[in-house]
Image: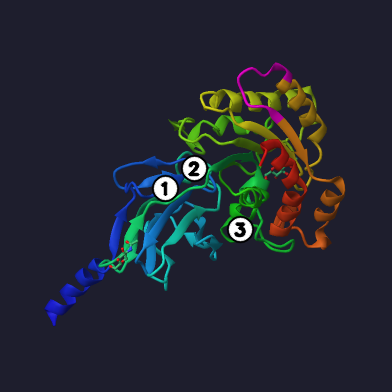
């Protein structure tokens, strides 16, 4: 009897195959920092991807930031229900009842931004996958897509309130979802994968996002991101509506400095990414569009090292329709729900295709 009790945990442990966070078959997309025990990440839409074979279930050992985080699994290109990951590291079942005779792709995605906003306190960690059954399970290399986009933005890109309703509270553990945003929908429509550096409430002037763009973890400036790690085809930018100050020359020069920063950081890319500027945010999203159009012209006339800048926009009629509370396009806090994001994506998709030649 005693012997049996002692053996049980050992049997349970040996029935799954542990894949440590350092396994070279794991594909990381976004900004990550590895220690010996785990890999840390904080920006929204950081993704850890694998392909499994001869496997029936997959779990992962994860921790969220000190205010917890929300994650999503995309299994064979189909998103499953989001789930909350608490601050203390524990094991989460990501997929079960898989058909072991087929290979499966699994993307584990953090769909909240760093809502703690205090140095590394909002950082999530991933330490291992467990695959069952241990006797047959194996990892195959994960094949990423050829196209990569880097989105820069505020709450609309971070998916603030995207899973809420106009009458729901804005608890990010229930309503934030970067996967369903215009950024996610645009990337999928273009068959591109994407990273995002987005901070709800940020802009270029009042609370400039530029101060965080060099950070591997959003609010921790002790670890600098190596911009050579990923070279996107384009940086797609939707920022500015949150700058409450009048849209002045000051705003224009701050916005220009964002474009120059991005051109500078990516200047070693074999082909400098295009800089696509998007008009169409929620709440007061049309406010800065004229100024941004002017900045794009200025940037292109002085630009020597960066990719070309362009401007794409939602139709005013669409914007009016989706920003009315009763029309069914809004989540909480007057931010777009998935349907609102879809309307924005629908208006800009062909414009972006044209810019990219896709
Ligand atoms: C899965 O297991 C079968 C039977 O052992 C083996 O023939 C096959 O190669 C395995 N598949 C992969 C992708 O490893
Ligand atoms: C002008 C504007 O949109 N201001 C908003 C910026 O973001 C903060 C935090 O999300 C909001 O409280 C402001 O209303």
Choose between 268 and 357: the one closer to the eye: 357
Q: Which mark is residue 171?
A: 3
Tell me: is circle 2 under 8 Å from ligand 2.
no
| Residue for badge 1 | 27
User: Which mark sits nearer the N-terminus, 3 or 1?
Assistant: 1
Disc 2 secondary structure class? loop
Estimate the x, y position of residue 102 in percent, counting from the top left: 41, 67
Estimate the x, y position of residue 247 in percent, counting from the top left: 80, 30
User: Which mark sits nearer the N-terminus, 3 or 2?
Assistant: 2
| Residue for badge 2 | 30
- The residue positioned 69% from the left and 29% from the top of the image is 309
Residue 307 covered by magenta stretch: yes
Could you tell me which quadrant the N terminus lies in? Answer: bottom left
Judge the density around disc 1: few (<14), some (14-19), many (≥20) Cα neighbours within 10 Å: some
Left or right relative to 101: residue 278: right
- The residue positioned 52% from the left and 27% from the top of the image is 270
Estimate the x, y position of residue 221 in percent, counting from the top left: 47, 32
Left or right relative to 142: residue 16: left
Choose between 307 and 120: the one closer to the eye: 307
Give the spatial CA distance, label 3 vs label 2: 25 Å
Left or right relative to 336: residue 246: right
**Residue 301 in view in this figure:** yes
């Amino acid at each position: 009897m005693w012997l049996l009790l002692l053996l049980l945990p050992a049997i349970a442990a040996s029935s799954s195959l542990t894949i440590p966070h350092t396994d070279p078959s794991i594909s990381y997309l976004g900004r990550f920092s590895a220690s010996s025990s785990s890999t840390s990440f904080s920006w929204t839409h950081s993704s850890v991807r694998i392909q499994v074979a001869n496997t029936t279930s997959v779990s992962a050992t994860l921790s969220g930031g000190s205010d917890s985080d929300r994650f999503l699994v995309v299994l064979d290109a189909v998103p499953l229900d989001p789930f909350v990951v608490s601050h203390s590291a524990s094991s989460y079942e990501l997929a079960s009842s898989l058909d072991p005779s087929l290979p499966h792709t699994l993307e584990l995605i953090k769909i909240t931004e760093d809502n703690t906003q205090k140095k590394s306190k909002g950082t999530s960690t991933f330490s291992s996958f467990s695959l069952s059954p241990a006797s047959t399970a194996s990892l195959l290399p994960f094949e990423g897509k050829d196209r990569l986009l880097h989105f820069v933005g505020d709450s609309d890109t971070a998916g603030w309130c995207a899973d809420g309703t106009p009458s729901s509270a804005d608890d990010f553990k229930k309503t934030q979802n970067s996967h369903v945003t215009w950024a996610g929908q645009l990337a999928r429509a273009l068959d591109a994968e994407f990273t995002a550096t987005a901070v709800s409430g940020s802009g270029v002037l009042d609370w400039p996002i530029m101060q965080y763009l060099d950070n591997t973890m959003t609010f921790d400036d002790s670890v600098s991101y190596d911009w050579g790690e990923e070279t996107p085809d384009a940086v797609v930018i939707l920022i500015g509506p949150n700058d409450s100050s009048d849209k002045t020359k000051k705003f224009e020069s701050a916005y220009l400095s964002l474009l120059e920063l991005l051109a500078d950081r990516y200047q070693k890319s074999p082909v400098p990414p295009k800089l696509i500027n998007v008009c169409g945010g929620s709440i007061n999203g049309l406010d800065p569009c004229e100024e941004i159009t002017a900045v794009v012209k200025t940037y292109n006339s002085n630009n020597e090292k960066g990719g070309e800048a362009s401007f794409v926009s939602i139709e005013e009629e669409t914007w009016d329709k989706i920003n009315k509370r009763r029309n069914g396009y809004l989540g909480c806090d007057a931010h777009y729900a998935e349907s609102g994001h879809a309307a924005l994506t629908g208006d800009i998709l062909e414009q972006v295709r044209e810019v990219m030649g896709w």
